[in-house]
Amino acid sequence: MKARLILPFLVLLTAQASALTPAELQRITFDQHIGQVLSRDLRFRESSGQAVSLGDYFGDKPILLVLGYYHCPMLCTLINDGMIASLQELRLSAGRDFRIVSVSIDPSEAPETAAAKKIQYLKQYGRAGAEDGWHFLVGDKNTIAQLASETGFRFAYDSVSREFAHPTGFIVVTPDGKISRYLLGLRFDARELQAAITAAANRQEGSLVKQLTLVCFHYNPITGKYGALIINVLRLSSILTLILLLALIVRLGRRPRATVTS
């Protein structure tokens, strides 16, 4: 099942910033594979260098699965910043109530890079016990491609910027490795996140994220900026909202007041 952008021509705004064609950029999105069971035997290496299987993290807790890469100049940081900000509002804690598994989509990245990123994000999260509940993995090209395919994570390497273009958001997985739902964008509502974690803990499947959400969070994956058209749309929306409010005020002001008879 594919969540497509309502305005696919928005990808034209990024064409001049990369070697990727507009058609390729249009495919940089999440195909929402809700109900997909992830392969347990996918082999990775932890930030410690230890060889692990994806199934090692299945069991008794739901999982927040975050795909990106550790030297990402902006977008991955923004996604994780948004996720951490929401997690800090929850009583639920990583390690105790759920796991976080971050996976690099760059096969050239080493466990040392993952370890440095783990230190950074654990310090930012600031919760006791999170060290054993947040895992940072690296893998080879084939393993990454299979996990990306199973999760519907469409990404591409841009030869001009030498970076990866990829969608924004992360995946909530049940304790037995089934995709429960997707949280898309750069900022995540804490109540929605808690509900998603709770539903996954109960092995419930969510619904597709509305397409409008993708449009609202449309992001240039190469330059790290919102497209000019989106900025103009937001400005226009603000103006229209103001006009509607003014019209409502005028309408209420013209209503005849009720007279009081003695």
Image (cartoon, helix red, strand yellow):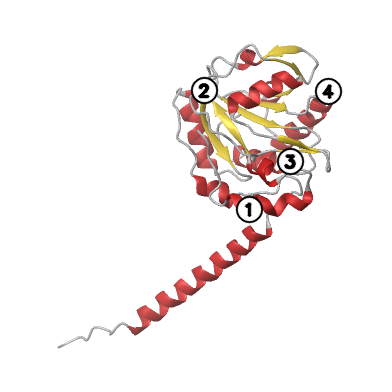
Residue topped by disc 4: 110
Amino acid type at circle 4 is Ala
Indicate left or right for 164 with 42 as reference: right
Residue 50 placement: quadrant:
top right
What mark, if any, has residue 77 been given in the picture?
3
The first of marks 1 and 2 along the sequence is 1
Q: Is mark 4 on a helix, strand or loop?
A: loop
Residue topped by disc 1: 10
Residue topped by disc 2: 36
Q: Indicate which label's residue lies in the foreground, 4 or 2.
A: 2
Q: Which of 119 and 188 is in front in this view?
A: 188
Image point (70%, 49%), residue name: 220
Confirm or deny contact between disc 2 and disc 3 (CB under 8 A).
Answer: no
Q: What element carries label 1?
A: helix
Q: Is mark 3 on a helix, strand or loop?
A: helix
The first of marks 2 and 3 along the sequence is 2
